[in-house]
Amino acid sequence: IDGIFFDEMSNDLALVGYYQALRDHVASRSATARTIGNPGTPFTFDSSNGASGHDVDDYAAVFDTLMTFESDVTEYLNAYVAPTWAERVDASRFAHVVHSVTSDADSKQALTLSKQRKAGFVYLTHDVMPNPYDELSSRFADERARLLAANQAPPGQAVPIPGLALLAGLLGLLGGLLARARGARPGHGP
């Protein structure tokens, strides 16, 4: 295991300390393990949990990568709103997951937008709800080729960041494994 994906995590700033403890535990087991957090929604502060003393910068710094978008292609193309603090953070710290990408035109546009929106990691899939992660995207090879071409460094220069990468191995296969573990047929919910 070379990383941990924290799915469906809380977006409440009062829980930053809890997630820092989880991250520290992972690091104690493997100093090189990548941690990815997925709140799936913007950050909030729920005052019922008491004063946390943490802000969005603390929340964003908990994991190596934070998923700042996870929804369908229509929302991604037409309604995406970047976190206000995103400009202060390196692109390698962000991931976007876009499902229901059923046309080549939408795939191309979403990949272009993901770079403009500072997503260091992006995964697009044709698959739809209720489980858009139970199979690898039918456009995986084409999307991978586009990403590799878009991230080629000029001759003699190194690419400064890992560039856009696909989270397919993590998300596509994780969905299938979770469905099997829950006894569901892939694509048919829990």
Image: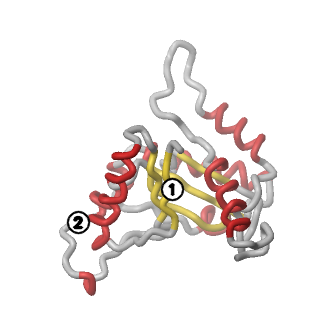
Q: Residues within 10 Å of mark 2 (few under 14, many from 20)?
A: some
* Residue 22 image position (x, y, % from top left): 36, 59
**Which quadrant of the figure contains the C terminus?**
bottom right
* Disc number placed over residue 54 in the picture, else none: 2
* Residue 95 image position (x, y, % from top left): 52, 52
Q: Residue most toward the bottom?
A: 48
Residue 122 shown left or right of residue 26 in the figure: right
Residue 151 shown left or right of residue 90 in the figure: right
Query: For the residue labelled by badge 1, is the local secondary structure a helix, a strand or a loop?
Result: strand
Q: Residue at x 50, y 17 (%)?
A: 157
155 vs 45: above or below: above
* Residue 182 image position (x, y, % from top left): 69, 72
Residue annotated with mark 1: 5
Q: Residue at x 60, y 63 (%)?
A: 76
Q: Given the image, on which type of amino acid does mark 1 rest? A: Phe
Please say if the residues under marks 2 and 1 sit with CB atoms less than 8 Å apart: no
Q: Given the image, on which type of amino acid does mark 2 rest? A: His
* Residue 45 image position (x, y, % from top left): 30, 76
* Disc number placed over residue 162 in the picture, else none: none
48 vs 114: above or below: below
